[in-house]
Image (cartoon, rainbow, N blue to C red):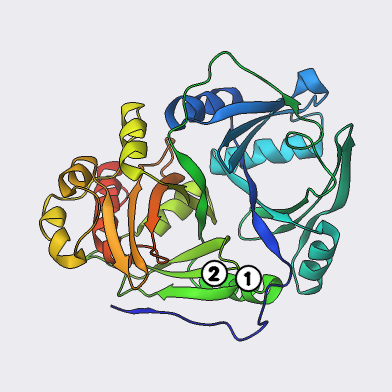
Amino acid sequence: MATSTVEVAAPAQDTFPINGTDYIEFYVGNAKQAALYYRAAFGFQLVAYRGPETGSRDRASYLLQQDKIRFVLTTAVRPDLSEDARRIADHVYAHGDGVRDLALWVDDARDAFAKAVERGAIPVQEPTVLKDDDGEIVIAAFRIYGQTVHSLVERRNYHGLFMPGFVAVTPHYAPPAVGLKYVDHCVGNVELGKMNYWVDFYAHVMGFRNLLTFDDKTISTEYSSLMSKVMANGNDRIKFPINEPASGKRKSQIDEYLDFYDGPGVQHMALATDDIIKTVTTLRDRGVEFLSVPTTYYQELQGRLGKIDEPIEELEKLGILVDRDPDGYLLQIFTKPVEDRPTVFYEIIQRKGAKSFGAGNFKALFEAIEREQGLRGNL
């Protein structure tokens, strides 16, 4: 297997400490309806709102939460009222519904922003103080691949629900959670030749290390392939795999994404659970569609992996994949795209000691994605 672990030599530690993912913000065409989908299908709770009724005349945002995962869905209500609202509308026009902001929770946003910019990050928002009766939040942002940004969010002097401008809501409709716990990792797709550029960016600007490298021999089929490098911060709470296409007989999943997203962006988010069988069963029953693999995958599973806790027949029924590394094993499954453009999708993952990303499943997964590409006429 052509998989290697590569340590980034410099800098030797994080440029600034990161406590975890603060939130993920999507720019969408209709935030009200998108919020209802994530509540009904994925079990998120609508906990706060910002919009015309709260003084934000040009846009509306819905804060959804499940355990430690926070999604913010934002839409432009009046693009003619502000430059920010126009940017939201233009983002949706170009990309469809997609991730704008992978926001990071930091102790000192001013210091983190200054260090990132000093090392070459392109500023998007200078440190800004947001205040209300619950205290203040400091937020700044810099650009990463495509039109995606990292916001840096400092919360040490804030005791409110989320941030100033949002008001708490308690809707009558509150479907039960499905067991999603936290963001395990977020995957970005970039153009051919740009993977190492962004690897170097995360290494130099943020002090991340190259945790794993997968070349086109590891992630390939007869028709297409891709390359990927996983960047991680010091405490491993933040992991960003970065993919680029590789040459093949036909168009890879990364090429398809880049075509339909109109450039680089966040391909998928991996959401962790402590009981993947229960979580996936509930998601499927609520209408979430998953990729499927041939039954032969499960005939070979026990011999390849050894003993696992979960019944093989249950995993096969749901299409859940399993892989092992020296630290344990993991279980994972991938949704189909969650909108009409074949762009954004989700991974549901349960780690039972494993620290890797399921390299043993790449071929089966890639072939499943290619089958869907073929049906769309994009392979």
Residue 202: mark: 1
Marks 2 and 1 in Cβ contact (< 8 Å): yes
Residue 156 located left or right of residue 257: right
Q: What separation in Å lies between label 2 and label 1 (alpha carbons)?
A: 7 Å
The answer to whether residue 49 is above or below residue 334 is above
Counting from the top left corner in percent of width and height, residue 336 is at: 35, 42
Q: Amino acid at mark 1?
A: Tyr
**Is residue 209 at all visible to an observer of this figure?**
yes
Give residue 266's position: percent from left, percent from top: 53, 52
Neighbor class of circle 2 (other Cα within 10 Å; few <14, some 14-19, many 20+) is many
Identity of the residue drawn at 59% across and 35% down: 65
376 displayed left or right of 84:
left
Q: Quadrant of residue 222?
A: bottom left
Left or right of 287: which side holds 16?
A: right
Q: Which residue corresponds to mark 2?
A: 231
Question: Residue 370: x percent and y percent?
Answer: 27, 53
Relative image position of residue 151 (x, y in whole percent): 72, 52
